[in-house]
Structure formats: C-alpha cells, structure tokens
Amino acid sequence: MKTNKILKTILALSLIASVATSCSSDDNTPEAVDEEEVITTMNISLLSENGDTVSLQSQDLDGDGPNSPVITVENLAANTTYTGSIELLNETETPAEDITEEVAEESDEHQFFFNVSGSIASTTYGDTDGDGNPIGLSFTLVTGDAGEGTIQVTLRHEPTKPNDGTLADAGGETDIAQTFTVVVE
C-alpha cells in the first residue's frame, strides 16, 4: 500500500513537471516578420568619366496590375566608363518611401545582379556588405562601340552569399527586375 502511494506521488510529480515544462516558452521574443518590399520605381543614375549624367527609370505604379512599367532611357556614350547608383522607391505611399535605405541596412539580405549584352561591355560591383559580398547599389558600367545593348538589373532578397554573380547560383526571391534597352552612340 505504501508502495502504491509512493508510486502515485512520483507519477503525479512527474506529470506536473512534464506539463509545467511543456507549457513554458524559452523564447519570449517572437521572430520579427520581414515583409517583402513594395518597389514601384527603379532609378539608375550613371555618371560618365567626363561628368555627363544619364538616367534610366522603370516606374510601375500599379504593381502587378494590368499596366506595364513605364521605361525611360537616355542614350549612353560609346567606349565610356560610368559610375552607377540605384535608387528604389515605393510611390504607392505619400511621400514616396525610399526602399534604397532598407536595402542598404539589410545589405547581407540583398544583392543586385547585372546581365548585359550588345554594346554594354561590363558591370562591376562598387559596394559590399559587412561580410565583403557584393550589393550593387553602386557599380561601374562600361560601354563598348556604338550600337544597341541591354542592361538587366535584378534585386534578389536573401540570395546565397557568396555566389558566382549569376541569378542561377543566387537563389532567393526577386524583389524587382527590369531590362533596359539602350542606345550607345
């Protein structure tokens, strides 16, 4: 009889301990939800070695709506090196939200990818995150001989870092992507 009481007491204490530990939470701070950025506008500013400025813009104010983005492109000079910078905006808000700041602050979670063809010879990253991996908010673009070319700019969220600089190796999710067809004269 005494043995039954002892066993019942041990069983009851074990059950209480089990319930108490399973209901407690070691993590009282919930994980922050990082919502995807709304990006309506991509502004690319290119400054040539002789001080000329060229602008490229993609503006899509209805997002995934029925209207295509409005693309504005200025001509580039042949055989020229440009220093580039990218600005991202959410123009669904008033005033427009500068998403560029968020990308810079979360640089370890973002990377631009550049794919060029035709009379656009190359691009080179001009900035890095805290681990030395490229970001792409600033970059260098080099044009070749006169003709036509394309510049595809894609921002990936949470890409694999480091990567080989291609979208295929990057993974992650695309925040914005735009291809600009340019005239090089």
Image: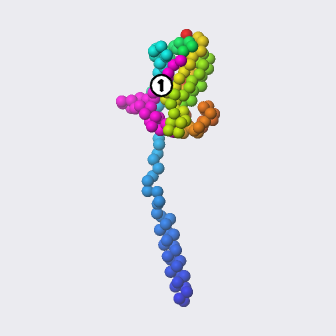
Foreground residue among 97 and 50 = 50
Q: Quadrant of residue 147?
A: top right
Q: Magenta span covers which residues?
A: 81-108
SS of the residue under disc 1: strand
Q: Residues within 10 Å of mark 1 (few under 14, many from 20)?
A: some
Q: Residue furthest bottom?
A: 1
- Relative vertical location of residue 34 with respect to residue 167 in this rendering, above or below: below
Residue 67 makes an appearance in the image:
no
- What number of labels is visible? 1
Residue pointed to by mark 1: 85
- Relative vertical location of residue 1 with respect to residue 137 in this rendering, above or below: below
Residue in the image at 45% along x and 29% along y: 88
Foreground residue among 181 and 51 = 51
Q: Which quadrant holds the C terminus?
A: top right
Residue 145 image position (x, y, % from top left): 60, 12
Residue in the image at 59% along x and 37% along y: 162
Is residue 74 one of those drawn in magenta? no
Q: Which quadrant holds the N terminus?
A: bottom right
Residue in the image at 46% along x and 63% along y: 24
Residue 121 image position (x, y, % from top left): 60, 19
Is residue 84 one of those drawn in magenta? yes
Q: Is residue 168 left or right of residue 136?
A: right
Residue 164 image position (x, y, % from top left): 62, 33
Residue type at numbered disc 1: Ser
Residue in the image at 50% along x and 21% along y: 83
